[in-house]
Amino acid sequence: MRKSVLQASIILMVLPLFVILGCEKQNEVGDVEADISAINNNIDQYASSMNAGDLNLWISLWADDAIQMAPDAPAVIGKEQIRAKYESIFPQFIFKMTITNEEVRIGGDLAFSRGNYTVSMTPKAGGETIKIDGKYLSIEERQADGSWKIIRSCFNDNAPPKEVELEGTAG
């Protein structure tokens, strides 16, 4: 009888712990799903802000200490430097961008997203449309207000590499 009371007491003490931990795990999953949804929404806003030519909305997706690593160019460090770079680009082109996000992974207050994009850039002054088919990898960070901002962005196109003739290999 004494053993049964002891077992029942242990069960009554441990059971609430399992319930609490079980609910906490569900909340974590729910939060991860909400975070993934928020990051996917940012990706949609990234494309739609470019398509609308809305530099202010586009730059609002970046953290103050963000770094953009474009192909064949030095890294652009800081949100204001990224803005300065694009202040001259946004007014020159009509953008038509689509982004297909392939993956989002969350780890605490950091996440990464990876996917593909296409963009057509038609010069407003006239001229040939530039078309790019590429891929990207971005790192996002949860901000104090719970939103997500881009802190690192790396992208490049899917064009085949240019053939390089090495010295001594020709003809």
Image (cartoon, grey):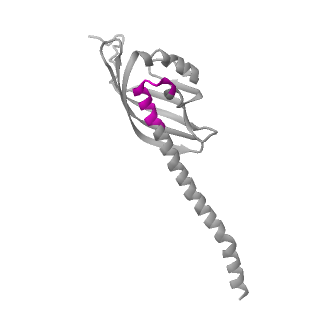
* Up-down relation of residue 170 to residue 113 (above or below): above
Q: Residue 47, how many percent across, how many down?
A: 42, 31
Q: Is residue 118 above or below residue 72?
A: below
If the image is split into quadrants, where does the C terminus sit? top left
Percent position (x, y) of residue 122?
A: 34, 18
Q: Count up the numbered dots.
A: 0
Residue 81: image location, x then y, percent:
56, 19
Residue furthest bottom in the image: 1
Q: Nearer the viewer, residue 50 or 153?
A: 50
Name the residue at the left extreme: 171
Which segment did they paint magenta? 42-56
99 lies left or right of 3? left
Along the line of sight, the residue nearer the viewer: 28 or 52:
52
Q: Which secondary structure type mostly characterizes the magenta part of the structure?
A: helix
The part of the image, by quadrant, that contains residue 8 is bottom right
On the rendered image, what quadrant is the N terminus found in?
bottom right
Q: Residue at x 65, y 69 (%)?
A: 16
Q: Residue at x 64, y 39 (%)?
A: 144
Q: Where 5 falls versus 96 (above or below)?
A: below
Rendered image quadrant of residue 14? bottom right
Q: Is residue 164 visible?
A: yes
- Relative to 36, say whether 46 is above or below: above
Identify the residue at horizontal 59%, vertical 61% (top origin).
Answer: 23
Q: Residue 58 in the image: x percent, y percent? A: 49, 28
Question: Does residue 75 appear in the picture of this structure?
Answer: no
Work out whether residue 78 or residue 87 is closer to the camera in this orientation and state it. Answer: 87
Is 134 inside the magenta-drawn segment? no
